[in-house]
Image (spheres, rainbow, N blue to C red):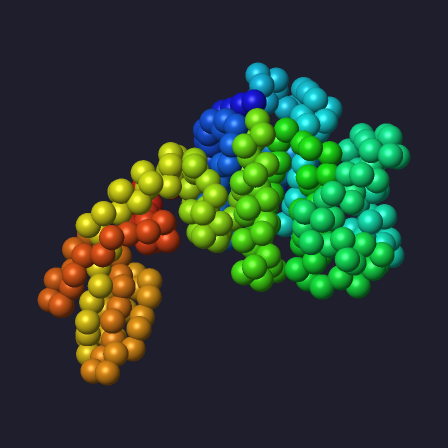
Amino acid sequence: MNISIQDLNKVYPNGNHALKDVNIEINEGMFGLLGPNGAGKSSLMRILVTLMKPSSGRVLVNGKDTAKHRDYVRSMLGYLPQDFSFFSNLKTYEFLDYAARLSGMSSGKKRRAAVDKMLEEVALFDVRNRKAGKLSGGMKRRLGIAQALINDPKIVIVDEPTTGLDPEERIRFRNLLARISSQDVIIILSTHIVADISSTCEHMALLNRGQVAFTGSPEEIIRQAEGHVWSLYVDEKEYVEVNQKYQVIATVMQKDGWKVTVVGDEVLGYDAEPVSPNLEHAYVYFVEHTLKNRILV
């Protein structure tokens, strides 16, 4: 399985250039698409699932142009949009059965088995007879995840999937995706939550203002932030100055001041110590320092 995104552009009627010359290669496994809100992630997701046409460029799935082979793409696709909706009057299992029908699962026996298995996977079996509209926010999100996975798709695209999930549910979901990604499947996880990428994805792209700013592994982008993350111990006056001069990532109050973590090429005039970066540090550094020097047109 392979997805090749080539010279992709999307310009909306209002002139918003949502995607600018996007080129990404995605192979089997878990692929993370990271970026701030408004980066163009949802526009890219809608093009990948053939719900929207690009202004120019193309997307190939196993060498087939999605604009010419929509049925081929949709036959192997599971999709959870950011604004997932459902029929609130259907019971939970009824909605999932309906989703299985739409995905092409015609055998009633096969659907019932698949529905029960998936309800167990997302911890909704005990509420299978509850109307979907009566589920909690986190349960509704899990139901959305279930409908995306119900027919064992070869391509799974999930847009901000952990929104509304508590920490335990988020871990359960990430473990579920990790298990599925080992089965010759492409999973594209689009999110602004760094932890969702760092704990699950071997490959990723960073999207900002419609452009691809980075592609590679999380470890590669972390290495690029080495020497650019600092821990400072400052008093009240210095704390105000630091917030004006640098991008502050974290602040911890101390007895005699504050311990502040910042990103920057260098930090002068303060008691600063270098910190080994994690993906969150690297993400902030890359957006704030690498991208601000790039002229976006």
- In the displayed image of the protein, which residue is found farthest to the top? 63
Any part of residue 113 in sight: yes
- In the displayed image of the protein, which residue is found farthest to the bottom? 255
Identify the image quadrant of the C terminus. Answer: top left
Residue placed at 47% from the left, 35% from the top? 20
Residue placed at 86% from the left, 53% from the top? 90
Q: Position of residue 294 (x, y in %)?
A: 31, 42
Q: Is residue 198 left or right of residue 226?
A: right
Q: Is residue 118 left or right of residue 113?
A: left
Q: Position of residue 211 (x, y in %)?
A: 43, 39
Q: 160 or 53: which is nearer to us?
A: 160
Residue 111 is drawn in which quadrant? top right
Identify the image quadrant of the N terminus. Answer: top right
Any part of residue 57 in sight: no
Residue 151 is drawn in which quadrant? top right
Q: 291 or 27: which is nearer to us?
A: 27
Q: Is residue 122 above or below residue 239?
A: above
Q: Is residue 297 left or right of residue 104?
A: left
Residue 77 is drawn in which quadrant? top right
Q: Position of residue 99 (x, y in %)?
A: 79, 41
Q: Is residue 140 left or right of residue 20?
A: right
- In the displayed image of the protein, which residue is found farthest to the left? 269
- Counting the numbered discs, the total is 0
Q: Position of residue 175 (x, y in %)?
A: 55, 46
Residue placed at 25% from the left, 71% from the top? 259
Q: Is residue 27 above or below residue 150?
A: above
Q: 224 or 14: which is nearer to us?
A: 224
Residue placed at 49% from the left, 36% from the top? 31
Q: Is residue 200 above or below residue 250?
A: above
